[in-house]
Image (cartoon, rainbow, N blue to C red):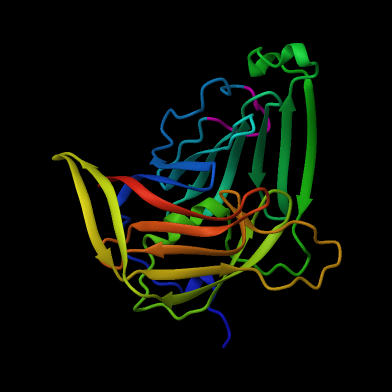
Amino acid sequence: QCPSRFTEIKFHNSIPWKELYFQGGKGFTRVTAAIRLRSPKGFCPVGTTGLFSGFMPCPLEKADIRVLSVETAMSNLIPPQEEYTQHVWFKQETDQALQRLRIKKGNSPWIKAYTWNENGVSRLKIQPKHPLDVNKKPEKWKKTHKSFYPFPKKTRCQIISEPTLLFHLLSRIDTKKTRFPLELCIFGKKELHRVIIRLMRLEPLKVSFESYGLQGTRRIEKNVTPLVFFISEPPSQDKKKREQFSLLGLRDEIFIFVDPKTRLPVRLMGKTSKFGHIVLALTGAWLK
């Protein structure tokens, strides 16, 4: 069956959440992720205002734009803990990515800025030039490197999104009016990926999380027969292709479980390069 393209996807008018919190792990490995939707008005991450002047506007303020922010941390018995923060500016109606900031903390920090354009993605990386500069503010970092990652000549992608925007897309997709599988064009770290999304149904699973809202905090515990979105990438014919598609550090076969009634992502499952198979469960959600 020929996959549906983005223009064939049917959507609900809104998504039900503002923030999502996931936790999981395997053995002594712990993984946490916090996902937030925010307005772009006046938003520029602390320490980056003016840092990428002339390369990437920050703040980027337009009526049809939103920002998806993701904070992830991985830790085990062997330090150090890996911490990353990411911000993606995108068009909320189409999930077209416009620009992205990726920030790595710790002993070898860096900040990478990305801008999407018609022919590819430009990247500017800033990091300390010397070990003694690690604790200095990013504007004092002296080592910079520019890169450009061109899209294949026969891309034919109307929308080129970003991996973490799958949480936004799958929270508003109308599965009853959309034909599966789907084919999406998504730019990862250095390469464009053609991702296939298939819809599955599994046996009921128990979910348990804190629900936050204007009326306070509630504990939600219930059984859900989830919509399961199986995310994969077909084998590439391009021998130069080196990058695997990944989402929050998960790669290979990725599954996102969504409650069909609330449209909340309640579970994420996949493999990591360091820790093997990992399941992340929803532990908290700030609802609209």
Q: Residue at x 44, y 77 (%)?
A: 200
Q: Residue 237, how many percent across, how many down?
A: 80, 73
Is 255 situated above or below 27? below
> For residue 15: magenta?
no
Q: Quadrant of residue 18?
A: top left
Is 82 situated above or below 169? above
Quadrant position of the N terminus in the picture: bottom right
The part of the chain drawn in magenta is: 51-58
Residue 237 as seen in the image, left or right of residue 261: right
Q: Quadrant of residue 147?
A: top right
Q: Main secondary structure of the magenta part?
A: loop
Q: Residue at x 51, y 70 (%)?
A: 230
User: In front here: 23 or 153?
Assistant: 23
User: In front here: 22 or 203?
Assistant: 203
In this view, the residue farthest toward the left is 215
Q: Residue 68, how many percent across, how many down?
A: 46, 43
In this view, the residue farthest toward the right is 239
Q: In the rendered image, is residue 158 in sight?
A: yes
Q: Residue 168, how many percent across, how many down?
A: 43, 55
Q: Residue at x 56, y 22 (%)?
A: 49
Q: Residue 53, how many percent across, how many down?
A: 65, 26
In this view, the residue farthest toward the bottom is 1
Q: In the rendered image, is residue 93 in sight?
A: no
